[in-house]
Amino acid sequence: MLNKLTKIKRLLLIGKEIWHNKRSMRGRFIIYLLSLVLLAGSAMLILLNVIGIVQPPSHDIDRFLEYELNTRTNDIKRQMNALAAHNIDLSQQLQNDIDRVMLEQGIYNNYDALNNNPEALTAIQQATYQTLAAKMQQAPASGALYLINASVNTNLLEPTYNGLFLKFTNIYSENTLFNETCMFRGNPQVARNNNISLYSTWQLELNVHAYPQADKLLHAKENNISQQYILTDVAHLKESWEQSRLFLMPINSNNGRIIGICGFEISSVYFQQRT
């Protein structure tokens, strides 16, 4: 009886060992299959990534940023090209207006006679207002201006230049067609005659110390206007709460002398609306 029990116990141990070995082989087989599946999946993802079907999120971000950069760059280039075209036309019209007034004043081609001559300078502003205001409505800008290399008072410690500087009063979008116009610099009588208000910190003439490039262009000797477009650095006008930059070119006399500058203002507020 004892021998039989011993034999049964041995059979049970052998069976248990066989079952354990079977389960270990099955586990190893399952692990092997899972490894094959993971390896095949990884290989497939790598292949899809190489041929461009699957891209990591960072790649999409890079493409989006590159697209935005190209879009903004092209928009700024179009704006600058439009300003250049408007500026050429503005310069030529202002030259004609100034020459006509100087002829009427009996000082034709005598630009030095404009200094300390408020009557002639006011007459020029009266004659040029509509030209400047109309061009400001057409151009992609927050304001328009011109300055003549002359002043009603040449005895000031800091030189100022006579002319008109018009600005849009409120800019809510890049469309400025129906915005009101105010006078930042110029003769107040001209503002009254054209039913526009004065800027809160209006002054008669402009000191261009905030824009060194503008002052340099105003006193340049060359007369090739196609090579004298400038876009000034961003600056803060002393009498304005805005930062802005100017897109400028010379106003030439009929004999090629640079008698002033004209162009457009791009304020920080307007630039934000454009972008």
Image: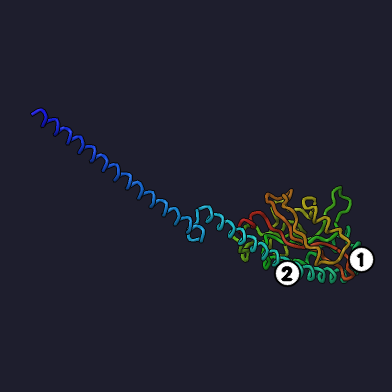
Q: 10 Å neighbourhood of mark 2: few (<14), some, or many (≥20)?
A: few
Residue 94 figure quarter: bottom right
User: Could you say which is closer to the camera, residue 94 or residue 46?
Assistant: 46
The residue depicted at 59 percent of the width and 58 percent of the height is 66
The mark closer to the camera, 2 or 1, is 2
Q: Secondary structure at mark 2?
A: helix
User: Farthest left residue?
Assistant: 1
Q: Which residue is mark 2?
A: 85
In what quadrant of the picture does the N terminus appear?
A: top left
Give the number of marks. 2
Q: Residues within 10 Å of mark 1 (few under 14, many from 20)?
A: few
**Left or right: where does residue 80 sit relative to residue 56?**
right
Residue farthest to the front, as pictured: 3
Label 1 sits on a secondary structure element that is loop
Q: Position of residue 261 (x, y in %)?
A: 80, 62
Amino acid carrying label 2: it is: Ala
**Residue 175 at x, y = what percent?**
61, 64
Side (left or right) of 49 relative to 264: left
Residue at image mark 1: 110
Query: Residue reaching furthest top?
Result: 2
Q: Is residue 176 left or right of residue 2?
A: right
State whether residue 70 is above or below residue 18: below
Q: Is residue 123 visible?
A: no
Q: Is residue 71 visible?
A: yes
Identify the residue at horizontal 45%, vertical 55% (top origin).
43
Cα–Cα span, label 2 and label 1: 29 Å
Query: Could you say which is closer to the camera, residue 76 or residue 61?
Result: 61
Return the x and y of residue 147 as percentages of the image width and height. Answer: 80, 60
Amino acid type shown at disc 1: Asn
Left or right position of 20 against 260: left
